[in-house]
Image (cartoon, rainbow, N blue to C red):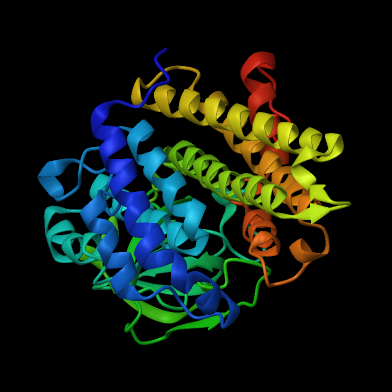
Amino acid sequence: MDFQLDSLQLELRDALRRYLEAEVAPMVHAYEAQSLPVPRKTVMAMKDFGLLGGLLPEEVGGFGLPMTTYGMLICEVARVWPSLRSIISTSNLAASVLVEGGSKHLIERYLPGILSAEKLAAFALSEPNIGSDAAHIETRATPTADGWKVNGRKLYISVGTIADVGVVFVKSPMADGKQGVSCLLFENTMPGFSTTGIPKMGMHSCPLGELLFDDVAIPAANLVGKEGQAFSLAKKYLNVGRCVVAFSALGIAEAAYEAAVKFSLERSQFGRKIAGFQLVQQMIADMMTLVETSRLLCYRAADALDRNAPDAQALCSMAKRYATDAVLRVAETSMQVHGGAGYTALFPIERYYRDARHLSIAEGTNQIQSMLMAQTVLGVSAIR
């Protein structure tokens, strides 16, 4: 396997990095400190770099990027502003589901706004009692003459309080009398819909919300996918989501590692730079190894997705589990290199740790990833 980026990838990466460092990085600290959402114009600017609809086919307005290129771009964004990365990938996930299962009418009506970021999109799956066990969701959709009435709560929904539209997964009756999972597209202006913000540890500029559906009428035309068969639609993009989370962890790890290197070359103790101390060099070496092994697993998983390889699921789980564990070790080690300064808000290190902490939970906890990985070689499920 060739691990070198090609000329187009290098051009895309360098252009995005220049923009992020010049236009985005200066605003991150102030916005995060005040829990202000990422400006919509900043999200819109990501379109120019292939990030909005990056994985979608060109015929629907996407860029048709391979996962290796898209993951590289996600890593660059996470390196500067993880909240921006989360908004991008969440909206892209909803857009992918819409393109996969939506009617031509639904796609034409909603997709252009999502891909331009004029409309932010949410992916509403998790509930108070449902996380990884998504097949047993409790939000209900009752059939009506014109479509459905939806009742229930969705919890821990990224961009939930600022999303204009979204896809919501609901339990609905099927023709044979059984209950299935359906996917519906909703708008935040629909009567009976409301959302409440949820305070959280990190990524303060990507709001987290609880979505409430109280007799929300959703028209029949807003069905995404086949009625009662949307669970497979949700599962299809889990591997992509896990790969995206892994690249996000890699980006934060790179930032924390680079900060430690810079600080160690500037900070003096006992009459010399701390970079010359053996134990500091040991910590730098540990971070180097964690970053590079994370990078290898990220690109290995992305390549498997691009080739539709049979081991893609295991590799995505492996990359997600390893990279999200590694970034916490890198952030913590970087904080140690910074000493007391790293514990303060004067440096970004404590934010790197806070922003990274949720990644080992997102898209299925790392414990779930371990079970999925083992299942591929043992043939035995630890869940059912």
Q: In the figure, residue 284 lies in which quadrant?
A: top right
Residue beneath the point at 70% across and 37% down: 287
Tell me the quarter of the image containing the N terminus: top left
What x and y, as percent, mark residue 269? 84, 54
Residue beneath the point at 57% across and 72% down: 204
Q: In the figure, residue 286 lies in which quadrant?
A: top right
Nearest the viewer among 191 and 241 is 241
Tell me the quarter of the image containing the C terminus: top right
Nearest the viewer among 90 and 153 is 90
Q: In this picture, is 354 found above or below 99?
A: below
Q: How many marks do you count on the picture?
A: 0
Residue 142 as seen in the image, left or right of residue 118: right
Furthest-right residue in this view: 270
What x and y, as percent, mark residue 196? 54, 83
What x and y, as percent, mark residue 222? 25, 64
What x and y, as percent, mark residue 182? 39, 55
Nearest the viewer among 182 and 87 is 87
Residue beneath the point at 43% across and 48% down: 76
Residue beneath the point at 59% across and 37% down: 320
Residue 200 as seen in the image, left or right of residue 137: right
Q: In the figure, residue 369 lies in which quadrant?
A: top right
Residue 346 as seen in the image, left or right of residue 9: right
Q: In this picture, is 289 found above or below 174?
A: above
Furthest-front residue in this view: 271
Asked whether the viewer can see residue 227, the reply is no
Asked whether the viewer can see residue 311, the reply is yes
Nearest the viewer among 359 and 277 is 277
